[in-house]
Image: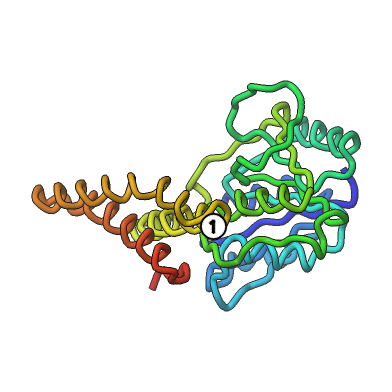
Amino acid sequence: MSNLTILSIAYKPRIELVDRLIENFASKYPILIINNSLSKLNDDFYHRKNVKIIDNELNLGNGAGINLGLKKIKTKYVLYLDFDSFIDTENLRKLDNHVKKLKDFAVLIPNSTGKKQYAEPYKTWKSEGSIMLFNLEIIRDKILFDEKYFLYFEETDFFFNCLKKNLDVFFLPDVTTLHSQGSSSVEDVKIENLRTWHYSWSQFYFYKKNFGTYYAYSKCFPFFFKDIIMLIAYTLTFKSKLFKFRFYRISGFLNSLIGLRSWKRIK
């Protein structure tokens, strides 16, 4: 595939995964890494050929990081990869074949689920986006990620807005990739709590924004009531770790419910 740039967003990534990305792609394609880590990456990465790293002073979140990358990149196509995602040479070749056939697409989404319910590409907005191929000639100046999301649902929201703007998003069942969810960064309890909070916040915001308040209530309130009951149960049984999980879910939902921004960060 020609006229392509690799884009990835970093938040305290594991060194071996950054190294894998560079080793696999830097010899063929330019790589742009948006670093949201609030500290520099391994010094060696800044001196690698065909690699550019932009260090942000603030953690912008994934969607805002992708927006920054899409604005900086000048090639026709952008292949976005989570650091915990991987596509091999054979599947990259299949992806290139679809690019040639589909032509005027906005986004192509390889199959990271392992499921092959359909043989041919099909249009969708319901998909995760650990690997996405953007056609900048189609989407430039037409659509960007909603930067109100910090984590979760930002790609689903983007695909749904593509649908509303008549921009084609295709899922590719035969282009298989690997996605080891949650393995791209150095994990600790604080990060897990942050993920829980943001998933809950983003879920309600997504449904309210795109389907209305009552629909958002119907989707999220059953989980909220269950979380309240489990929070009480864990309080009585002194299960502090499980208590925190439910607490952060409830907190994220309530903040989204009353219209507060997605403010939660690690101190």
Question: Does residue 78 show up?
Answer: yes
Image quarter (top left, top right, bottom left or bottom right) of the N terminus: top right
Q: Nearer the viewer, residue 246 or 229?
A: 229
Viewer-closest of 112 and 155: 155
Viewer can see residue 265: no
Horizontal side of residue 198 vs 85, given as left or right: left
| Residue found at the far left of this picture | 236
- The answer to whether residue 206 is left or right of residue 165 is left
Going by the numbered disc 1, the residue's amino acid type is: Pro
Rendered image quadrant of residue 69: bottom right
Q: Secondary structure at mark 1?
A: loop
Horizontal and vertical percent for residue 258?
39, 68
225 horizontally vs 57: left or right: left
Q: Position of residue 136 (x, y in %)?
A: 83, 56
Q: In this rendered view, identify the residue nearer to me: 170 or 99.
A: 170
Image quarter in which the C terminus is found: bottom left
